[in-house]
Amino acid sequence: MSKMNEECCEMVLSALVSEKPGCGKCSKDFRRSEKGMQCEICESWWHIKCIGMSDETYKYLKKEECKDLHWFCTGCSNDAINNLKMLMNLHSKQEKMTTEMVTLKSSVQELEIKVNNINIKVNKQDREMEGMLKKMNEVGSKLETSLDAISKMKEGNESITQIAGTETSTIEVTKLVEQKITQIRNEQEDKRQRENKMIFFGIKEDGNLEAKQRAAEDRVILIELFEIMKTKEEILSITRLGRKKEGSCRPVLVEVQNEKMKWNIIGRAKLLRESKKGEGIYITPDLTVQERKDALELRNELKNKREESKKTRMVEVGSSRKGGLWRNSSSYQSKENFK
């Protein structure tokens, strides 16, 4: 019987005592009827009487509209503001670091593109340098042969004459070779500076505009022409060549990012001839002075061959006609004789 009484007492006590732990101040267990507040940092419970909170304040804090209000015990409230400030600073630093990381990533990507372009240019220059070195070795070999011949001639007290078709000395031969090497180097450097450039002829020019306005108008026109040619290459620079003359349109020198882009545009020039807006406009690569001379010689040679071919055809046609008249005359005479 006493055992049953003990069990009943335990059940009554468990019904009266709350599941909350003991009060942070008085250490007594919470009964279900007792009101308490839980610290949001250390999660300990406190009787409202122990912390000096009124029933009105307790009821107010339990309302739905007060769910954004926070309560901390005395031990935690001293550090709560500092912890909150620290969290806000950490959050601000995290956002700043995220922004810096995005910027850094973008910079790295741009740097990779630039490095790739530099590698392409360096590889191209290496190939050009190899070609130049090969030519210089050939010239040096010829020079060495000539100098050996001159040296032998001097040892035998022979006069130095007829070297490369002219009378010259060893010093003059050296100077001629050095001049030729310098000329080759200058030509290669000139080609390198022009490799990304081309010239547009026939683009109309408004002589009344200022330089900046004219440059802006030329850029707009070129972009429209690029659209006709179905290309979107980036334009690095635009320059009108020569002095401005009334009633004439100066050629436009255009520079793009690399040589491949330049030839891509020149290869699409036929699309301009098929459009009304591109009528009268044609494109050529930007040639060096020597390349222009060579091109002029080729054109003149082609022109002369065409004229010679035309004269030859005219002579052949004339001979054929004369032969025909003679045959007709002969045929006519034979008929008369037959009669």
Image (spheres, helix red, strand yellow):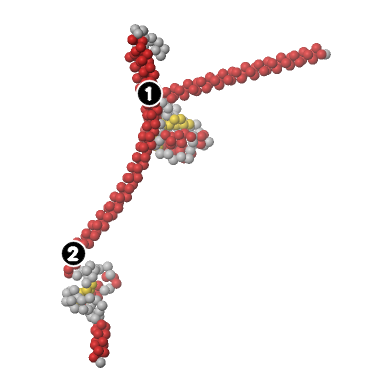
Decide: is 321 above or below 78. Answer: above
In the rendered image, residue 196, in percent from the top left (x then y), is placed at 40, 33
Tag 2: amino acid: Asp
Q: Quadrant of the C terminus?
A: top right
Task: Identify the residue at the far right of this view.
Answer: 339
Residue closer to the observer: 313 or 61: 313
| Residue 217 visible to an observer of this rendering | no
Residue closer to the observer: 236 or 33: 33
For residue 80, the mark is: none
Decide: is 193 above or below 63. Answer: above
Identify the residue at horizontal 43%, vertical 36% (top origin): 261
Decide: is 114 above or below 335. Answer: below
Indicate the quadrant where residue 221 lies. top left
Task: Find out whether the residues at labels 1 and 2 contact each other: C-beta distance under 8 Å.
Answer: no
Q: Is residue 301 left or right of residue 161?
A: right
Indicate the quadrant where residue 5 lies. bottom left
Q: Which residue in the protein does label 1 denote? A: 137
For residue 79, the mark is: 2
SS of the residue under disc 1? helix
| First along the sequence among labels 1 and 2 | 2
Tag 1: amino acid: Asn
Decide: is 309 above or below 26. Answer: above
Identify the residue at horizontal 55%, vertical 21% (top origin): 306
SS of the residue under disc 2? helix
In the rendered image, residue 332, in percent from the top left (x then y), is placed at 77, 15
Q: Is residue 233 left or right of residue 20?
A: right
Identify the residue at horizontal 60%, vertical 18% (top origin): 312
Identify the residue at horizontal 36%, vertical 15% (top origin): 148
In the rendered image, residue 205, in percent from the top left (x then y), is placed at 43, 32
In the rendered image, residue 293, in percent from the top left (x then y), is placed at 44, 22
